[in-house]
């Protein structure tokens, strides 16, 4: 199920879109996840996309409450889209705080990896940070 959700998110989800100081995802509601908003000052677009994808993966695998807590993020339903617009997400928006783009190399999925060797979901984040 998680693999199908991930494929759907990667195929149908769009990122990054710019909106009021944030770079955001759009379309995660199609796989039952909230959108992810990252401050535009968090890094390059490539880095932000990698972080958005990592947060979405954490949401799918670990759940909303734990991801919000560990990421020091908040859940908001204050959308810039109207309820009848395609981009409106009834699951809300995970807003990451300033500075959320710089994290330690310790895997937040707690799989024991300290680099991208054993955790495929983190490989994009680590490679984006190196560039």
Image: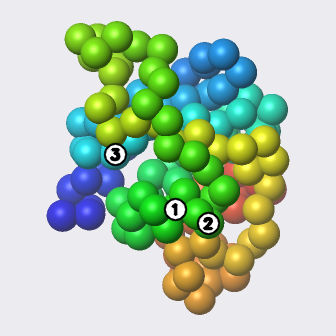
- Compare marks 3 and 2 and give the one earlier in the sequence: 3
Q: Residues within 10 Å of mark 3 (few under 14, many from 20)?
A: many
Q: Label 3, on which residue?
A: 33
On the image, the x and y values in percent for residue 8 come to 26, 44
Q: Is residue 126 left or right of residue 117?
A: right
Q: Quadrant of residue 118?
A: bottom right
Q: Residue at x 45, y 21 (%)?
A: 79
Residue at disc 3, secondary structure: loop
Label 2 and label 1: CA atoms lie apart by: 5 Å
Q: Residues within 10 Å of mark 1 (few under 14, many from 20)?
A: many
On the image, the x and y values in percent for residue 28 come to 35, 38
Q: Are marks 2 and 1 in contact (CB under 8 Å)?
A: yes
Q: Is residue 37 left or right of residue 35?
A: right
Instruction: Say which mark, if any, is on residue 70.
Output: 2
Q: Label 1, on which residue?
A: 67
Picture layout, residue 20 above or below residue 68: above
Residue 73 visible in the displayed image: yes
């Amino acid at each position: 199920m998680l693999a199908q959700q991930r494929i759907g998110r990667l195929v149908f989800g769009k990122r990054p879109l710019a909106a009021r100081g944030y770079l955001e995802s759009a379309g995660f509601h199609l796989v039952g996840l909230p959108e992810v908003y990252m401050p535009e000052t968090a890094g390059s677009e490539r880095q932000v996309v990698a972080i958005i994808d990592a947060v979405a993966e954490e949401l799918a695998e670990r759940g909303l409450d734990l991801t919000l807590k560990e990421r020091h993020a908040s859940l908001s339903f204050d959308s810039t889209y109207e309820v009848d617009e395609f981009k409106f997400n009834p699951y809300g928006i995970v807003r990451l705080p300033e500075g959320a783009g710089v994290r330690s190399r310790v895997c937040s999925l707690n799989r024991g990896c300290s680099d991208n060797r054993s955790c495929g979901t983190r490989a994009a984040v680590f490679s984006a940070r190196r560039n």
